Amino acid sequence: MDEIAAAELSDKFLEFFNEYYIDRINDMYLGYPKTRSLMVDIKDLEKIDHELALEMINNPDSIFPPANAALAKLNPNPEAKENVYARFYGIEGSPLIQDVGSEYIGKMLTLDSLPVKRSEIIPKVAIGVFKCTFCGTTIKIKMERETVVDLCPQCKRRSLKQDNSESHFTNLQKIAVQDPLEKLKGSTPTWQLEVWLEDDLVNTVTPGDRIDITGILRIRPRKTTKGKDDKMLYSMLFDAVSIVHKQKEFTDIEISKEE
Ligand SMILES: [Zn+2]
């Protein structure tokens, strides 16, 4: 997407936020930077722009940056640096977790989920600071998933080293989720999906909670036996956008209700 298209999209979101969410956005900024997330019902977006809502579900990676940029523009503090997130939720017609497959790669969906495992907090570099060991040049880069940095822009040598004391870190946590038991009508869940929680979503989920997770399905190469990236086989991971808590899972009660 070019810059003009992104700016137009951002204006659309600005209009949408002003129309539907301005009170909640003002509340969020009262608590900023502790509160940096705005929960947004995708049905509200559907009401004013059905096509845009559909595009967000099918192509979230191009639609989220302009949406988050629009939210950041509403920050009354022009010096603000911490990220803000439009956390969309409530996509209907979601599959069972055990049926999530390649047709959903790159798309956004909402999964009715039972978390079963939770990892420790993993620090992840958000803004990397690199220093050239040869000429001393320092550069700052916003790290994306695939960013590889080693070439010095000044002396053109591959001599950049990351400076961890200057880099800006964010938190990452992995959880595993499965289908809630009553949805499987008595059969045992056999499949778990890995979910990545970032930044303020970390530590908001406990195993046994009952949650709707909205997120983007991604893949990454599996490792071959020699430790190289496999070109054919990929594993799936679910990059969380929002979490909505429902009631706790009371297995016995749920099962007896079914009968
Ligand atoms: Zn250099």
Image (tube, rainbow, N blue to C red):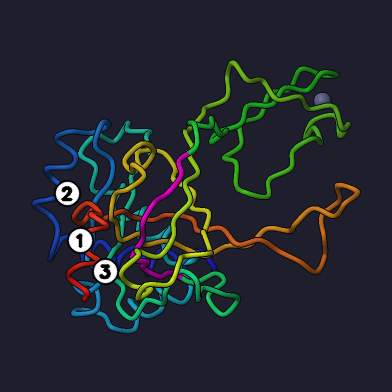
In x, y percent, where is residue 255?
A: 25, 66
Left or right side of 74 for 177: right
Q: Which residue is mark 1?
A: 17
Read off the residue under disc 2.
25
Indicate the position of residue 119 as horizontal and vertical percent values: 50, 37
> What x and y, as percent, mark residue 149?
74, 38
Ligand 1 in which quarter? top right
Q: Is residue 157 left or right of residue 12?
A: right
Residue named by callout 3: 90
Q: Rounded to the nearest whole Å, what is the CA distance between mark 2 and mark 3? A: 19 Å
- Name the residue rendered at 31%, 55% in the picture: 87
Amino acid type, mark 3 = Gly
Q: Quadrant of the C terminus?
A: bottom left
Residue type, mark 2 in image: Ile
Instruction: Tell me which amino acid carries mark 1.
Output: Phe
The residue range painted magenta reads 108-118
Main secondary structure along the magenta-highlighted residues? strand
Q: Secondary structure at mark 3?
A: loop
Q: Residue at x 61, y 37 (%)?
A: 141
